[in-house]
Amino acid sequence: MPTTKQGTAKNTAATQAGKQAAAPKHTTAKQAGTPAAAKHTTSHGLMKAVQPSAELAAIVGNKPLPRTEITKRIWAYIKEHGLQDATNKRLINADATLRPLFGGQDQVSMLELPKLMSRHVH
């Protein structure tokens, strides 16, 4: 049974008519250009700005920062000064600036880092 182009054209026309009859889509705040879309900030959880202690401020600065930004800056400091252990990259060697943050330890695991840093934020 051969198909005709005429039958296909009817189906396409019916599909187009169905699309036109559909309800209009809602616009989001971002699409509408409302002030809420300009910048969405949260003041809780990891994005809440915390005040670093004097020891931590030597690395990340004295202004309140979210924990995520503090972590980024600590890792930037570690990489900039080559403080990752050469044989085991999971270990971080302390220098004079990091030693007070590490509780006097010469070397800590990267998994301990968030716990140690949480002691130095308010």
Image (cartoon, grey):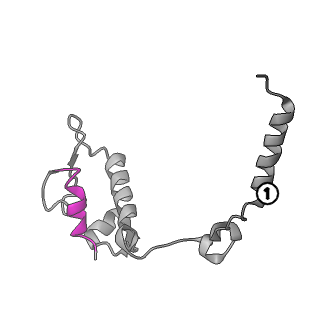
Residue 101 appears in view: no
Residue at 25% x, 60% y: name it. 114
Residue at the spot of label 1: 20
In terms of depth relative to the viewer, which is nearer, 27 or 62? 27
Residue 113 magenta: yes
x, y (%) of residue 49? Answer: 39, 74
SS under mark 1: helix
Residue at 45% x, 74% y: name it. 42
In terms of depth relative to the viewer, which is nearer, 66 or 104? 66
The range drawn in magenta is 108-121
Q: Residue furthest top?
A: 1
In terms of depth relative to the viewer, which is nearer, 68 or 74? 68
x, y (%) of residue 64? Answer: 39, 74
Residue at 83% x, 45% y: name it. 13
Q: Which quarter of the figure has residue 116?
A: bottom left
Quadrant that contains the N terminus: top right
x, y (%) of residue 29? Answer: 64, 71
Residue at 29% x, 66% y: name it. 56
x, y (%) of residue 34? Answer: 67, 75
Give the left or right position of residue 4, taking residue 116 as reference. Answer: right
Query: Which amino acid, mark 1?
Result: Gln
Q: Residue furthest right?
A: 6
Give the left or right position of residue 61, taking residue 86 as reference. Answer: right
Q: Is residue 110 above or below residue 41?
A: above
Give the left or right position of residue 55, taking residue 38 as reference. Answer: left
Residue 58 appears in view: yes
Residue 93 magenta: no
Give the left or right position of residue 27, taking residue 108 as reference. Answer: right
Q: Residues within 10 Å of mark 1 (few under 14, many from 20)?
A: few
